[in-house]
Amino acid sequence: MRINFHGAAHTVTGSQHLIEINGSKLLLDCGLYQGRRADTYERNLNFKHDPRKVDAVILSHAHIDHAGNLPNLTKQGYVGAIYATRATADLASLMIRDSGRIQESDTEFVNRKRAQRGEEPIEPLYTEQDAEEVAGMFKGVDYVEAFEPIPGVIARFYEAGHILGSAGVSLEIEEKGRKIRLWFSGDIGRYKMPLLRDPVLPDAADYMIMESTYGDKSHSDPEIAYSEFRDVVKRTVERGGKVIVPAFAVGRTQELVFNLNQMMEDGDVPRVPVYVDSPLAVNATQVFKNHLECFDEETAQFVREARHPALDFKMLTYVKSVEESKALNERTEPMVIISASGMAETGRIVHHIRNNIENPKNTICIVSWQAPNTMGRRLADREPQVNIFGEIYKRKCDVATIGGLSGHAGQDLLVKYATGVKDTVKQIFLVHGEEKQAMTLKSLLKEQKMDQVHYPDLHEGVDL
């Protein structure tokens, strides 16, 4: 048995772990790497393994850094099934189509700029049609339901609490008379978050592939994060500005709407229009309503009665057309605009930032982890100017960062998650984290007498 770490190694994005078992190849996730634009295209386009020889794919959840490169995998010859929870299958189908559409749109926009500079045009990484062809390959599976993706492997999904449908993956492996249990964490969520159930902790695993995104710090209490977000909205609205929030269309967007509804209902901030400018978010909200099995009974009842505060909100408008989106930038009154992508690299959020970054009344509010070399990271680092579509813009607006709204587990829960397998685990592989975060978590686990913790290099292979 061999694990090959072809993504999310020494970085957070681009999840892709290839496991060789009994002569078969099983791929855990197939996500897009997000980082320096000059590097991302080639890295995402070229696999370090042959997609034609992959026998099955298991997808932990629908976020683009875990699912977004599936169209390339199939374009290059993969023909097998893609196993996921039922909610993830529906969300991922939407999200990769949206990703293809965004890449086509952004490429068209960039090529107009390149033409003006006399440069050659570029091609999108993949198209909406490429993504459409992937949708029929998903096989939805219930949580805890056993399935056999390849011979000798029984797999099960367990609630991860990160986004709707997210899962940790348990693999019960039999190879050459040896039985091994491997656990893949996917992205680990948090306790007591709106909409989602709490993550299920692993137990009795021999090996574990585990995220380490926030291995260097614990999050503030969700109530503190709520207060910080409320204060950002209040002071921005009171000075007549717009709050611009880059947020993933699935997960953070619904939680932000929940919080905004609450603070306006309580009279803590003025009632202003809230716009979710993402066609994907419109469809994703319907997916939420279609998968009541992912909620506790109280939340499911709210959804059935169309009165859940994160899905039905009087001040909320979902922006569908490009014309409606552009019109928001012509308006000057206070408002909140939530738009994808969460790292401000693609999609309509880039245009909203471009049109609002030089107005000191406005605030760009960063509410999730930002990969190095993305525009979201440059904004979070408060760089004085940013390059948007090849043009330089001075940052005159305010920037607020609120870590406590992240959907990733903080350091304290990561330690608790790992120590759940302390009595059985032979080795833990830390992925989905930058070096500082992963090494800090590794040191903490060593204090718990867990010495077999490895931080694999990109494309490193490990025999078990």
Image (cartoon, rainbow, N blue to C red):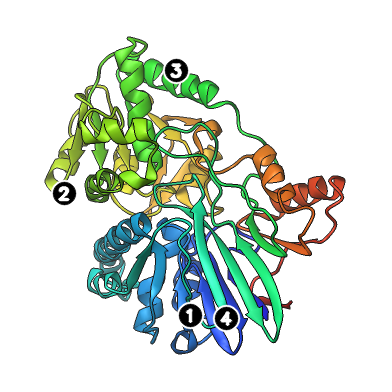
Q: CA distance from mark 3 to mark 2?
A: 30 Å
Circle 4 is placed at which residue position?
A: 152
Circle 1 is placed at which residue position?
A: 46
**Quick one: label 1, few (<14), some, or many (20+) residues within 10 Å?**
few
Q: Amino acid at mark 3?
A: Asp
Q: Secondary structure at mark 4?
A: loop
Determine which of the numbered discs, if any, sits on residue 105 in the image.
none
Residue in the foreground of this view, choosing between 211 and 239? 211
Q: Earlier in the sequence, mark 4 or mark 2?
A: 4
Q: Amino acid at mark 2?
A: Val
Circle 3 is placed at which residue position?
A: 231
Residue in the foreground of this view, choosing between 58 and 220? 58
Q: Earlier in the sequence, mark 4 or mark 1?
A: 1
3 and 1 marks in contact (CB < 8 Å)? no
Q: Is residue 168 visible in this depiction of the protein?
A: yes
Q: CA distance from mark 3 to mark 1?
A: 45 Å
Q: Is residue 453 left or right of residue 158?
A: right
**Mark 4 or 1: the one toward you:** 4
Q: Position of residue 385 (x, y in %)?
A: 47, 42
Q: CA distance from mark 4 to mark 3?
A: 54 Å
Circle 2 is placed at which residue position?
A: 322
Q: Earlier in the sequence, mark 3 or mark 1?
A: 1
Q: Quadrant of the C terminus?
A: bottom right
Q: Secondary structure at mark 1?
A: loop
In the depicted structure, whether residue 345 falls above or below residue 352: below
